[in-house]
Image (cartoon, grey):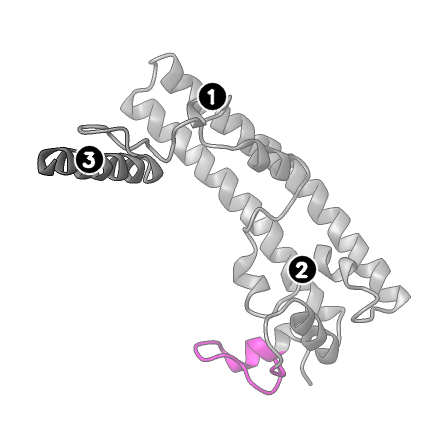
Amino acid sequence: MRHAKTKRKAATLAAFLGAALLAAGGHGHGAEPASPYAGQQQRPIKSLSADDITELRRGGGWGLAKAAELNGVPGPAHLLELKDEIPLTEDQVVAVTALFDRMKSRAVEQGERLIELERALEVLFRNGTATDTVLRQALDAIGQARAELRYIHLVTHLETPKILSPEQIAKYNRLRGYGTADPCASPPEGHDAEMWRKHHGCK
């Protein structure tokens, strides 16, 4: 009887441990965890997701303007989204729309260039034709394309404070969830106060 109880306890423990391993993603002793890249080998361009390509082709920000956006310098796309809440005047809407259209046209063109350069890099490795020299050239071109695309987005942010009042900029940042401090009264530590106030249209 005691032997049967011991066997039942052992079986229960083994079942428990097996369930725990499955819940944790294990497949038994010696199983290797899957790479976080698993599945991405099916991408046409391994370095770009489908969402990345869509964002680049529509001229989206792709996170490239965070240095401006998160330091209180608004972007035209979100200004237009919040035009009624800020609010923007009709003349301001016209000016911001012109900024946005110009930025989008340039960003779409540069985004397509970046996609093609990443595709070319993909082909080098897919076909086994990558060499040290060719790789350096490909990466230099990709780096320049990314830098230009980032410039397009960031330089547009530099133009918006010329159109807005300090109060509108402060309202934009509150609506975007970036805090309630008056950007003219409190330039962030590490920023040149004069340039900060200039970018925010402070008097």
146 falls in the magenta region: no
Would you identify the image quadrant in which residue 54 lies? top right
**Residue linked to disc 1:** 42
Contact, mark 3 vs mark 2 (Cβ under 8 Å)? no
> Secondary structure of the magenta portion, mostly?
loop
User: Which residue corresponds to mark 2?
Assistant: 75
What residue is at 57 percent from the left and 44 percent from the top? 149
Q: Secondary structure at mark 1?
A: helix
Q: Residue drawn 16% across and 38% down?
A: 5
Q: 190 left or right of 194? A: left
- In this rendered view, identify the residue nearer to me: 154 or 48: 48
Residue count near mark 3 (Cα–Cα under 10 Å), binned few <14, some 14–19, many ≥20:
few
Q: Quadrant of the N terminus?
A: top left
Query: Residue 7 placed where, x, y %?
Result: 15, 33
Left or right: where 117 falls relative to 172: left
Residue wearing tag 3: 8
* On screen, residue 56 above or below 181: above
Q: Position of residue 185 (x, y in %)?
A: 60, 87
Segment tinted magenta in the rendering: 181-197
The picture places residue 15, in percent across and down from the top left corner, at 26, 34
Magenta residue check for 195? yes
